Amino acid sequence: MPLNAEEHILGVADVCSKKWDMLAERPLAFLLSAFAGGAFVCFGAMLALAVSAGVPQNLAPGLANLLMGLVFMFSLVLIMFSGMTLVTADMAYGLVGVFQSRISWASFVWGVFVGYVGNFAGSMAFMWIMSKGGGYHALPWLMRAHDIGVAKTGETAMEIFVMGIICTWTLQSAAILFMKTNDDLSKIVLAAYGPLAFVAGMNEHCIANIGFLAVPLFQQDLWLTAVSGMESVKPVLMHWGFGRYGWAHNQLFTVMGNGVGGTLFVAVVFQLVADPLKLQQLYRNRASDLGSDTTS
């Protein structure tokens, strides 16, 4: 049976405590957990690129996005069931922990920063290795990777920002509801829904985009060689900087949007829905149970 709102928030706060305790007591373990989480996200990004290459837009404009979402969706299942760290999920869990006085604001910011660093390293490492694979040097996959990169980096700052908000609004709603259920099937469905929604919905996720946008940059020389004789292709060069078609341009506004979506529209809402008096009673009951166990 699903937990009620107050039990749910208490459970999310407990997860926050476990994560931030790991950060304080075993920082290397936390960083490795974030590295694995970033790589798990890019397991899905690799599959999304693999299945969407060559899908004609005139067949059905949303078909490629649907295929990408269907294979991407199990990346969060891997993360949630393994207990690894994904910074966008920790934005929601951590803020609930702040509201429940489990961690300080400074600890929250530090945890999000370290989680992002680990996710960045895992995402970059996995996609760099993947970019060296011969299968992804074939024209359909070179073209698809470049098209995705150009589309994402070519958007305006506001376009990236609002799609970043929507991304974590859907994704972290699923991640936080993961904690509300008790059976594995429900947890799998909820964890799978979040990535399906943001990928099929063409949203912007900072950790997924680290890899999605790095691949065409790693392969840009190969792509230029492949399209050099194609009169129909007008080369658009990507770069690592903050200007249009820049990796950092997309990443900056995606991180900002993800932060707003996961905190303001998920953590704050779920916290305010819970009855504070009932929450206090749950804490009193827990303290009483712990006291009884100590006495016995």
Image: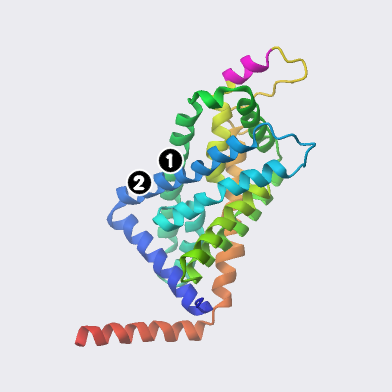
The vertical placement of 249 against 159, above or below, is above
Farthest residue toward the right?
58
Q: Which residue is mark 1?
A: 122
| Residue drawn at (48%, 52%) of the image | 87
Q: Answer yes or no: is residue 179 visible.
A: yes
The magenta-colored residue range is: 221-228
Find numbered disc 2 in the image and state the secondary structure of the residue it sits on: helix
Specify few, some or many for label 2: CA neighbours under 10 Å numbering under 14, 14-19, or 20 or more. Answer: some
Does residue 273 appear to the left or right of 120 in the view shown? right
Dominant secondary structure (helix, strand or loop) of the stretch shown in magenta = helix
The vertical placement of 62 against 127, above or below, is below
Q: Which residue is mark 2?
A: 32
The vertical placement of 264 against 56, above or below, is below
Specify few, some or many for label 1: CA neighbours under 10 Å numbering under 14, 14-19, or 20 or more. Answer: many
The vertical placement of 11 against 62, above or below, is below
| Residue drawn at (46%, 41%) of the image | 120
Q: Position of residue 276 (x, y in %)?
A: 51, 82
Q: Position of residue 183 (x, y in %)?
A: 47, 69
The answer to which quarter of the image holds residue 53 is top right
Closer to the camera, 50 or 40? Answer: 50
| Residue drawn at (58%, 76%) of the image | 273
Closer to the camera, 212 or 104? Answer: 212
